Amino acid sequence: MDWLAQLDPVSIYLAIGTMLVLAGVGLPFPEEICVIASGILLAQGLVTLHGVVLTLAIGIVGGDTAAYLMGRTFGMKLANYPPFRWALTEKHLERVQYEFRKHHVKAIFFGRLIMGVRFVTMIVAGMSRVPLWKFILLDASAASLTTPVTVSISYVVGDPERAKKILKSVDLIIAAVVVVALSSVWVVIRYRDRWKGPGKGQEGSDVIEEATNDAG
């Protein structure tokens, strides 16, 4: 990313924004690298805070929205192309969509936080016909949590390699938190009826027993 430092501010914003959009649709431009570069360039005084915030907001949400629109437009046809062809069969994608419709809020929010599943999450959101306004709101909310952290670390550290090492640890922590949170939600939903069942049954038995005693 050293070449970015040779550009004027407007060209820097355009370059970073373009790479973020391309990253959003699955091309090999890692989003984190663009965000790290923004923080370092900000520390060097080559860009402004307002310019970085605007560029990252448009680039990240724009790229994710483009992936969403791909899923919404092409649907199950995408199962014939990578990365879906490698990891998901058409039948599997149908199952993912079914689960996604029930828990799309959590899926979009947490999916944006984890780099490895981000692109697939946006595609499935489009396939599942999640309302565009809701998708953008969830996507932007999740991005607003992690992006400032990445920019701040890069700004303070000032070195892309050190920043990447630190952020790897941060990503692992986030992934662990997400897994624990989703697992907890699944357990609660899975066993909620079972927990309520005995209580309700016991309550009904008490009522019947009380009515019998009164009759006697």
Image: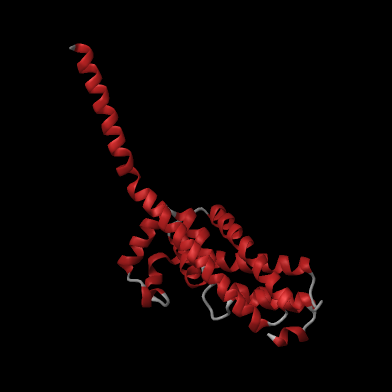
User: At x 70% / y 82%, what residue is drawn?
Assistant: 159
- Quadrant position of residue 198: top left
Q: Nearer the viewer, residue 77 or 122?
A: 122
Residue 214, quarter of the rendered image: top left
The number of numbered discs placed on residues in the rendered structure image is: 0
User: Going by the picture, which residue comes out furthest to the right?
Assistant: 45
Name the foreground residue: 170 vs 17.
170
Residue 135 makes an appearance in the image:
yes
Task: Please name the colour scheme applied to the rendered image.
Answer: secondary structure
User: Where residue 102 appears, x then y in whole percent?
Assistant: 40, 52
Spot occupied by residue 39 in the image (x, y as percentages of width and height): 72, 74
Specify whether 189 is left or right of 71. Answer: left
Q: Is residue 14 visible?
A: no
Residue 72 x %, y %: 47, 62
Rendered residue at 58%/69% (across/down): 63
Identify the residue at image location x=46%, y=55%. Answer: 104
